[in-house]
Image (cartoon, rainbow, N blue to C red):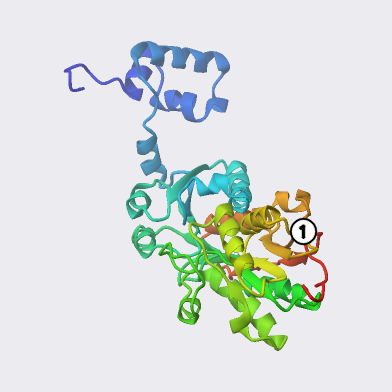
């Protein structure tokens, strides 16, 4: 009975009205290929007349023991997955697997452990550079298979990423080989505290975010191998992450003396902001300042000038992570995808005397 005293219409009600089995009515919703088009049309019409909305999806989920949905935990606000070019490419890769497997895609804010607790999913892809311990705790409590992408490795979880340090090293080595000795770095955030400025040595040593830490290490290794003091490398951190942070960090770097002749941006979004700042300062690229990004998003190749950057396979990351979390019974080694430096027009030889 419903709260107003009327009898609740169920699948059995529809079956009784038509003189067919409950399985036949169920097939009309879940396996239409098992019925003739005429019979299915009659069942749906009767159900509609009786006020039956169809099988309860939650009850069906419990009966199957799975919900046919894949969760993606985003370390940033969910809108980041649509606004950031690299994140959007990653989500395309995840979505391709979901479409192929007939799965729903559920996006969960990374810093909302309550959302992770109630999300109905069969497994979770954590697209998180610095995963939230509470959210991870909830995923573990629920016994869900999960894969970390771009963040640190965790026991019991799959992992997909690249060698961030090697990619950053190649970017810095490229500029050093072009004769640049005054480098500036436009980093991603080092800690989740919203701080801005030139990071001290202790702040650099205590970097919280995995990709930031590894890319900084790659830059530093190249600089020190070239015999240059790391302390002479200018770094300006700005928050929150994004193109505007790149613009403001670059403006601060340009105000320093001596001015850097080349910039290493930890993402193409930050590099785009750097190019904005250089244009505003009426400095030519690469004539006055060379710029290297990281990601190789589509806009990198069409910029003015086209951006030299470290290419990484964002879609492939998404595909591999989704496939891994859907096969939790298979022993899977961490996946380290390749990256390579793509040299374009934003870098050139250092002009002596600049």
The residue that appears at 36% across and 43% down in the rendered structure is 62
Position of residue 49 relative to residue 252, above or below, is: above
Say whether residue 12 is left or right of residue 303. left
In this orientation, does residue 291 appear?
yes
The residue that appears at 48% across and 23% down in the rendered structure is 28
Say whether residue 342 is left or right of residue 281. right
In front here: 335 or 211?
211
Quarter of the image with the N terminus is top left
Q: Label 1 belongs to which residue?
A: 284
Few, some or many residues within 10 Å of mark 1 (<14, 14–19, 20+): some
Q: Quadrant of residue 37 in the image?
A: top right
Q: Quadrant of residue 19 in the image?
A: top left
In front here: 2 or 110?
110
Quarter of the image with the C terminus is bottom right
In this orientation, does residue 329 appear?
no
Image coordinates for residue 229, horizontal then vertical, percent: 64, 86
Image coordinates for residue 112, horizontal then vertical, percent: 36, 53
- Secondary structure state at the residue bearing disc 1: loop
Image coordinates for residue 277, horizontal then vertical, percent: 64, 56
The residue that appears at 45% across and 68% down in the rendered structure is 191
């Amino acid at each position: 009975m419903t709260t107003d005293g009327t009898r609740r219409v169920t699948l059995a009600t529809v079956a009784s009205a038509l003189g067919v089995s409950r399985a036949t009515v169920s097939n009309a919703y879940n396996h239409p290929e098992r019925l003739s088009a005429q019979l299915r049309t009659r069942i749906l019409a009767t159900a509609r007349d009786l006020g039956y909305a169809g099988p309860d999806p939650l009850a069906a989920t419990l009966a199957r023991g799975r919900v046919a949905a894949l969760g993606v935990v985003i370390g940033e606000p969910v809108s980041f997955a649509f606004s950031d070019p690299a994140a959007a490419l990653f989500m395309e890769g995840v979505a391709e697997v979901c479409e192929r497997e007939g799965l729903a895609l559920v996006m969960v804010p990374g810093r909302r452990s309550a959302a992770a607790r109630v999300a109905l999913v069969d497994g979770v892809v954590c697209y998180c550079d610095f995963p939230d311990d509470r959210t991870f705790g909830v995923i573990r409590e629920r016994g869900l298979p999960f894969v970390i992408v771009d963040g640190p490795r965790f026991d019991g979880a799959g992992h997909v990423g690249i060698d961030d340090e090697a990619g950053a090293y190649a970017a810095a080595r490229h500029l050093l080989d072009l004769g640049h000795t005054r480098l500036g770095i436009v980093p991603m955030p080092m800690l989740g505290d919203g701080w801005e400025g030139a990071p001290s040595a202790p702040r650099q040593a205590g970097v919280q975010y995995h990709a930031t830490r590894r890319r900084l290490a790659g830059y530093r290794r190249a600089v020190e191998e070239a015999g240059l003091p790391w302390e002479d490398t200018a770094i300006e951190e700005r928050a929150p992450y994004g193109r505007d942070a790149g613009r403001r960090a670059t403006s601060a770097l340009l105000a320093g003396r001596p001015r850097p002749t080349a910039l290493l941006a930890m993402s193409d979004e930050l590099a785009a902001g750097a190019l904005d700042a250089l244009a505003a300062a009426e400095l030519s690229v690469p004539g006055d300042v060379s710029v290297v990004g990281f990601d190789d998003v589509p806009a990198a190749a069409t910029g003015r000038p086209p951006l030299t950057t470290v290419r990484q396979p964002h879609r492939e990351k998404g595909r591999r992570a989704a496939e891994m979390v859907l096969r939790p019974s298979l022993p899977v080694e961490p996946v380290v995808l390749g990256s390579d430096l793509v040299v374009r027009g934003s870098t050139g030889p250092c002009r002596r005397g600049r």
